[in-house]
Amino acid sequence: MASGSATSRAEVTPPAQWVEEWRARTRSVPTPLNRLVVPILATLLRIASPPTATVSYLLIAGYAFAGRSQAIVALFLCCIFNLTNHTLGGVPQAAALLRYLVYFCCLVAVLTAGRSPRATRQGWILIPYTVLICLLIMAHSVAVSPLLDVSLLKIISFTIVVLTIFTGWSWMDAGERQFAEKIIFGGLMVAAVTSIPIIPLGMGYMKNPGLFQGVMVHPQNFGPIMAVLSAYVGMQCLTMRPLPKWRIGMLLVGLLMVYLSRSRVALMSFIASMTFGLIAEACRGLMANFRKSPKVVASRVGLATALLALLLIVNWERVTNFYEDFIQKGNEGVTNVTEAYQQARGFLIERLLENIAAHPYSGIGFGVNSSEDEWNGIARDPIFGLPIMFTVEKGVMPLAVIEELGYPLAILVFGWIFMLGARSTRGGIVPFTVFMAVLLINLTESVLFSPGGMGMLVLLLVGWSATAPIGGPWLRPLPLPAPVRMEPSGRPASREAA
């Protein structure tokens, strides 16, 4: 009789079942080693030799069909393989063509797997708006672009990648999401640590003497990626309790890599993203507590401001020396950020502004270079003649969007980016900080719409931030209902009976 009563109780206790489901969705699950075999094997094949590098792309394309999280990891590995230092395994054969195979397999894998019943987010607004933006850009390319095949290839590849990323992250359950997050940020940590032995070697400075590129192909890729990693780990160091000591060491390694790369945009991205994250969280806390104790809040803000000012005054000489050394970047004629930015991106901005003035409403076409003299650098497939690579350097993403799409369509794109940022705030301070870090990189490296290189990692982290589960420090999680005791008949037990 007792066992039958217990069985009926378990079957008719929705609140208790809801609590157990919520705990299962948020429980930390360790990553089994067997799920790391393919990523590790593919990485070893990539750095072994050019022929085996080709096999590595085929391997991760098949690995994508293992599930939603594996498809996201496959896109991450494809990005890292494209950015790997060519002294490690050489230049992969047919990589420009094989990456499209990886994109397609990842999209098919995510759509085939579908949405998990325990998905952390739904994405009903994000995904349709993204599809609408992509369709409008396709129509714009058909109507405006002078290089129609190039524009269509770029927007189609971008659409495939961004839909895979947004649907993949949105449709994962908590365990899948945790696995993909560990692989991505763990992979970036491995890249930082394995770059340490390369510091005294010439292979770390192959692209530009004096600018460290680590295990990646260019300092302008390595520095910003290390800045994003430093922002992720740094914000965890400020908010995670208890704090594992190794994260502090990882933060120091990441900042060391940023300094050695001499990437000004990387340092700016790290400092600004951390500042925005802390300000946003401080404002949230102040708004929540100001009504309760305004004098206490005001005194704490004043004390923090005074201590920061005192710290800067005491160490002003050291700060200015470091600032001047980093900003100059080997060029003694540069004395401030404005001069450095003008020297590095000034000519690009001038061309952007000229094209915007000439085509303010129609734009020049998606993915089209600013100068017609550079339209000849298109790599085409030798069999079908399709464009598979067309490098475009714009520098400033907001201006590049206006130049290519015109003001009307650019406003919709900026609204899409704003929506992504707003959604990233729901997951807490860490996703918002990472989103700001990757967004700020685009002020000098316009890579958001270019998934062929570092833009893939930017899109992966934007998707991770925008689909973060609700319930971080920004929004208080919903209170769990207290379990209700049930009678064997299925009716709630009275308080007297309880």
Image (tube, rainbow, N blue to C red):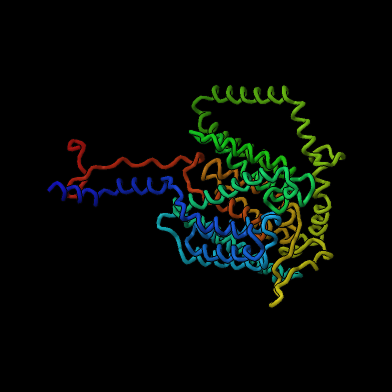
Of 69 and 435, nearer the camera is 69
Residue displayed at 21% across by 45% down = 486
Left or right: 20 with respect to 399?
Answer: left
- Whether residue 203 is visible here, answered yes or no, is yes
Image side of residue 289 versus residue 341, left or right:
left
Q: Pinpoint residue 383: horizontal percent, then vertical percent.
A: 69, 77
Relative to residue 141, is residue 352 depicted above or below?
above
Q: How many marks?
A: 0
Residue 260 on image: x %, y %: 72, 41
Where does the image place residue 387, in percent across and percent down from the top left? 71, 70
Name which residue lies at 43% across and 47% down.
29
Which residue is drawn at the image coordinates 47% and 66% (left, top)?
Answer: 112
Residue 141 appears in which quarter of the rendering?
bottom right
**Nearer to me, 449 or 233:** 233
Q: In the picture shown, does residue 363 fall above or below 465?
A: below
Image quarter in which the C terminus is found: top left
> Would you say 368 lies left or right of 252 here?
right
Q: Nearer the viewer, residue 44 or 318?
A: 44
The x and y percentages for residue 427 are: 51, 45
- The residue depicted at 51 percent of the width and 40 percent of the height is 474
